Image: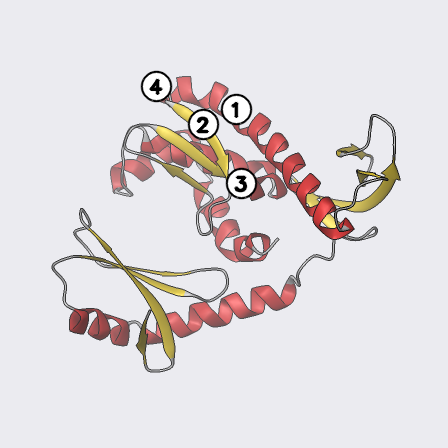
Amino acid sequence: PGKKGSIDFLLKVGKRKKTIGLLVDGKGGVTVYAPRFLTRDYVKTFLQTREDWIVRRQERARLAAAACPPKEYVSGESFLLFGRDLRLDIVRQTDLFAGGCTVAGDTLFVYLDGQTEHPEKESVRRLLRAFYCREIEQRVRQEIQYYAPVLGVSPKAIKIGDQATRWGSCSPSGKLRFNWRLAMMPSEVVRYVVIHELSHLRVLNHSKKFWGVVESVCPDWRKNRRWLRENGRALAAV
């Protein structure tokens, strides 16, 4: 990593990249994306011009982390499912229901195998993540089934992943990838993310033309994008 003043940063050089980019992740880490032809001195100068912005973003990340401490994965904790606040209830069983999750009312039940030798916290975390992955894949496919024909597009593949800094992505080949943590967000925000990535199948950039495509089916996209910017960092820590 490079270092500029008191700010550490990671420099990533791309063969096809033509412009310099800057990212501050949910933990306050700074990554600079730059094309090969830019010198290290240019990158350092670029960081100097953006130092105030970097510091503000890092402070925002710190406050978000403080407002959302790491989960302990114990009964009574609060977990979100499409914006609903659910209470975790961990149940140890030795029957066929062991090793799964269900929702009943406002409770999220996690059934642990009573004979497992894995630490309880890790087992609960693993089961919850698998549960969220299933839930968001089902929801994403439902949204795509409706909005893809409306936009006149057809994705080549749909994947659920654990991206560090993105809620969704669209590859040049037409493959869509979504973050499993979307399952914790309100349904309208999930819908916006799906529409956003589907729109990239028509316009693979963030030009005015692209946002026009998004707005044609999601007029309130600004509100949903703002929700992501204000709340996404806290969910990224789960």
Give whichever of discs 4 and 2 has the lower sequence position.
Answer: 4
Residue 152 is labelled as: 4
From the viewer's perspective, is the residue at label 3 or at label 1 nearer? 1
Q: Is residue 90 left or right of residue 52?
A: right
Q: Is residue 194 above or below residue 87?
A: above
- Cα distance between the residues tagged 4 and 3: 21 Å
Marks 2/1 in contact by CB < 8 Å: the verdict is: yes
Residue drawn at the location 26% of the way across and 36% of the way down: 209
Q: Position of residue 104 (x, y in %)?
A: 82, 33
Q: Is residue 23 above or below residue 217?
A: below
Q: CA distance from mark 3 to mark 1?
A: 15 Å
Q: Which residue is mark 1?
A: 141
Residue that numbered label 2 is attached to: 158
Eye-nearest disc, 4 or 1: 1
Please state which amino acid type lies under the numbered disc 3.
Val
Amino acid type, mark 4: Gly
Describe the colour scheme in one phrase.
secondary structure
Q: Residue at x 31, y 35 (%)?
A: 212
